[in-house]
Amino acid sequence: MQPLSQTNIGDTCTIKWMFGVPEVLETMKKLDIREGSTIHVIQKCRDWLIIGANNRRLAVGNEVADRIQV
């Protein structure tokens, strides 16, 4: 397992667990991104990354991505 922030562009991963601010977790769950979801890393920058899941795209800061284990 590793933090989502440590993955590479093009990686496809399954979320093993995630924790953090309840509001952020609730927003992700509303987008159907939760434990067991498969996500695709589309783009990375120094401070953020863009992931794709369920035909949706989401920009995630590294401070959030560090709390998502894949």
Image (cartoon, grey):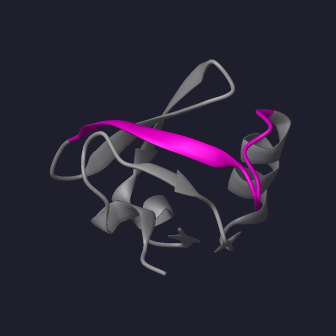
Task: Tally the numbered discs.
Answer: 0
Q: Residue at x 43, y 63 (%)?
A: 4
Q: Is residue 32 above or below residue 8?
A: above
In the rendering, at what x and y percent does residue 38 appear? 63, 46
Q: Residue at x 82, y 50 (%)?
A: 26
Q: Residue at x 31, y 60 (%)?
A: 7
6 with respect to 18 (left or right): left
Residue 35 found in image quarter: bottom right
Residue 32 found in image quarter: top right
In the rendering, at what x and y percent does residue 29 appear? 81, 45
Residue 9 found in image quarter: top left
Q: Is residue 4 above or below residue 40?
A: below
Q: Residue at x 15, y 52 (%)?
A: 46
State the extent of the magenta-drawn residues as a range: 31-44
58 with respect to 7 (left or right): right
Front-most of 20 and 39? 39
Which residue is outermost to the bottom?
Answer: 1
Which residue is outermost to the left?
Answer: 46
Q: Is residue 57 above or below residue 64?
A: above
In the rendering, at what x and y percent does residue 21 appear? 69, 66
The answer to if 41 sits in the magenta stretch is yes
Front-most of 36 and 58? 36
In the rendering, at what x and y percent does residue 3 appear? 43, 73
Q: Is residue 67 above or below residue 13?
A: below
